[in-house]
Image: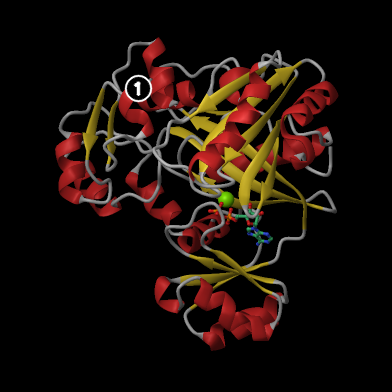
Amino acid sequence: MLCQAASCMAVKVAVLDPEKECPASSLAYRHVVGSFRDVNAVREFAKQCDVLTVEIEHVDVEALDELEKEGVDIEPKPSTIRIIQDKYLQKVHFKRHGVALADFKEVTNFEDAEEAGNTFGYPLMIKSRCLAYDGRGNAVAHNKEDLHKAVSSLGGFERGLYAEKWAPFVKELSVMVVRGRDGALLCFPTVETAHKDNICHTVEAPAQIRKDISDAAVMLAREAVGSLQGAGVFGVELFLLADGQVLLNEVAPRPHNSGHYTIEACYTSQFEQHLRAVLGLPLGDPAMKVRSAIMYNLLGEDEGDAGLTILQNKMRKALSIPGATVHWYGKSEIKRKRKMGHITLVGEDPLLVRTKMQEIIGNESPSSW
Ligand code: ADP
Ligand code: MG
């Protein structure tokens, strides 16, 4: 999607990805087959680029640090990627900067974990510090006896874990923030994200919430991104509590699933915005150019042809609905819970947009609609 945005301005994007037939390979100006976790591959790749940026935070940050010292232009800064790729360090960083978030504690053995349970209560969230995505680094312990199961499901303490106090949220919100090379910060509207099995399922923009809460979410997102270094877009995930308080969940230093709706719904998409930011071009207008948008993730529900048929039926329905756009990523294999594409629906009436999305996704619609 970054390559698609780049093509409008004839910006040439080279992509480093280990998979020969990766989704970007047919869209990128150049695709280098290699691992973004391999120092030498990253170094060789960087030689071909004017600016280096990331679309995933699980990269070799030591390599980026070295390259930065050698004068390679990297945005956002490796220091930011280092903080964000370790969720525990991320929490420490934001706490130090006074950003509101749930209490947390590093846990390196069962004594620590039990202490966290005593202090924070249950349910208790145990999280993997690194390499987590789509909930695949989280485990919930409902009581003290559950701790063993939770820890072992994450691969044990060796993996690097921390405990987080349960956030009894009524909604999950998200704000995309963009920072230019000159430090200017702009925010996209506050959206509501709904998750299924910890994976982002639908995104509704703007979030149907009180304006003061939506403003508070934007303020918190600004504050969080303001404490990090470098240009680019950042996805800020937030929890809204029953009393109206907004807490930070986590920040992604890149275009984010909760910002995919911006392609059809905003004057400047998150992808174009990211390019403009890292290239030092003037930033675009993040405001919505339609009143309402809903994005639905096409997640693998089965494997092989059976899985393909299920998603094709949904896409076929979407293609017959005015205002709907289908994105199919062309990933080589369908797997359960894998993000295979998404559908965005835009319109002028939020209720009508919900109704039309319901025609596509039926009983999968969030219960709050
Ligand atoms: P990921 O990297 O997989 O997105 P997150 O830390 O964002 O991991 O967690 C995924 C989901 O798990 C969140 O979107 C939220 O629904 C739930 N979750 C995460 N942390 C907490 C918490 N402290 N309390 C309650 N639910 C949580
Ligand atoms: Mg998350």
Relative to 317, does residue 246 appear above or below in the rendering?
Answer: below
Residue 315 placement (x, y as % from top left) = 61, 26
Element carrying mark 1: loop
- Pick the quarter of the image with the N terminus: top left
On the rendered structure, is 363 left or right of 198? right
Residue 205 placement (x, y as % from top left) = 71, 29
**Residue pointed to by mark 1:** 27
Residue shown at 54% from the left, 17% from the top: 268
Residue 226 placement (x, y as % from top left) = 52, 41
The amino acid sitting under disc 1 is Leu
Relative to 115, does residue 273 appear above or below in the rendering?
Answer: above
Q: Is mark 1 within 8 Å of ligand 1?
A: no
Residue 298 placement (x, y as % from top left) = 59, 36
351 or 270, which lies in front?
A: 351
On the rendered structure, is 153 left or right of 266? left
320 or 34, which lies in front?
A: 320
Q: Quadrant of residue 70?
A: top left
Residue 54 can be seen, yes or no: yes
